[in-house]
Amino acid sequence: MAKVIGGITTSHIPAVGNALADPAKRNDPYWKRFFDGYDPVREWLSDVKPDVAIVVYNDHGLNFFLDTIPTLAIGCAHEYKNADEGWALPQLETFPGDAQLSWHIVESLIGQEFDPTMCQEMLVDHGFVVPMHLMWGHLAGWPVKAIPLAINTVQHPLPTGRRLFNLGKALRAAIESYPEDLKVVVLGTGGMSHQLQGERAGLINVDFDLACMDAVINDPEWLASKSNSELIEQAGTEGVEIIMWLTMRGALHANVNVVQKHYHAPISNTGAGVLVLENAT
Amino acid sequence: MSWKEHDYESIPGTYVFDGKTSHSSYALNKLFYSFNQEENRKAFADDPEAYAGKFGLPDDQKAALLAGDFLALLKMGANIYYLAKLAIPSGTSVQDAGAAFHGITTDEFKALLQGNAEGFEEKLDRAGGFWHG
């Protein structure tokens, strides 16, 4: 049977993608401490060797326009491509998918009363691409199949953190009922505190970020109980993306072991938090 | 016919992109979305007024677009992620945009970011369990 072997949280901002594309940035004083914190993540991944990564992210106006915004959408294809997002991003190597597992997850989730939009063609934007590069971009070719799980964090009203936490629990049940012996890792991306817009642009709330990281490890209910308005107030209009971390957390057991816990700020306009969590045995 | 009020409307300097906002600026954000294609970015750069005319923008939104007034565009309903498709190709970074929203220089905005994060490493020490490098 398939199983969830762990979960990871990570930033997905374009500035990280730009820095990854420029080898000189790796040891640049601005970036070094941020990237150093990913070395243990890559080591863990090379040890546990997941077969599949489910990447929980939000589309920022590439695959979905405001004409039709699904709250939850899942890729059901055997491959995914990125595209120009408005600033001439290059066409990258295709990301391999696992259509059979995607369709199994869809069927299971809908049976558990979550209703994702099913996407047999899906362009993936920086929200998906940057985490994939942070995890595996240093390797020749992708060592995992990837399934994009896009959550609407652009057009309000957004789903609540609690719903996304429960989505993670349903996702775990879906994975654990798949007959193939696959090791699955779930990536919760986005955040942490940042506000790109308005006269409050530049908000970074380190105290709240650290409280959120502790909660994701030890007390996800604390984060799941926050309204999106509270999250906007504390973490900024774009910092509300942290609700996507709860889907990752829901896919794990109640008790987890911390493999990596890393925080850096500012990275571009954000606080950046990294967690690698394994189920406690 | 009325729009529901929301508690987030009282957060200062913050424009939540909800149904009311999105409804008022659908054409504007559709114009920004078109910039996902390079030929549309070029067409806009060649003749911004003619390009804006194709999307049927209200006069105030068109004027703010042609003036490159980010704060006015935001207040009239531009979504920040869609606004990025206007800003970034023209060489405006998210720090430049943040500075424009505040009416300060980009260096001042970067200093604001650094100041907001100041002392984070001591906080990590106090919280414990964080990776240090």
Image (tube, coloured by chain):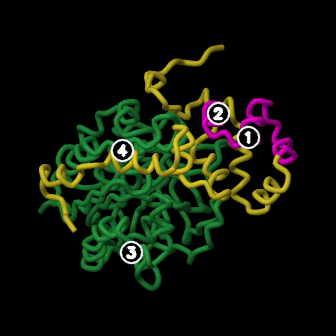
Chain colours: A green, B yellow
- The magenta stretch is B49-77
| Residue A45 shows up from this direction | yes
Residue B54 lies in the magenta-colored region: yes
Q: Which amino acid does label 4 sit on?
A: Ile
Q: Callout 4: few (<14), some (14-19), or many (20+) C-alpha neighbours within 10 Å?
A: many
| Mark in front: 1 vs 4 | 1
What is the CA distance from the residue labelled 3 to the residue labelled 2? 37 Å
Left or right of residue A70: residue A26: left
Q: Callout 2: few (<14), some (14-19), or many (20+) C-alpha neighbours within 10 Å?
A: some
Q: Are marks 3 and 4 in contact (CB under 8 Å)?
A: no
Left or right of residue A229: residue B19: right
Query: Which mark, residue A26?
Result: 3
What is the CA distance from the residue labelled 1 to the residue labelled 2? 10 Å
Residue at position x 38%, y 75% from top?
A26
- Which quarter shows the C terminus of chain A? bottom left
**Which chain is mark 4 on?**
A
Question: Looking at this view, is B113 or A140 the one in front?
Answer: B113
Residue at position x 52%, y 36% from top?
A198
The disc, 3 or 4, on the residue closer to the chain's N-terminal end is 3
Give the image location of residue A216, x and y in percent: 24, 48
Q: Which amino acid does label 2 sit on?
A: Ala
Query: Which mark, residue A70?
Result: none
**Which chain is mark 1 on?**
B
Question: Looking at this view, is A8 or A87 the one in front?
Answer: A87
| Mark in front: 1 vs 2 | 1
Residue A15 lies in the magenta-colored region: no
Residue corresponding to mark 1:
B67
Residue corresponding to mark 2:
B72
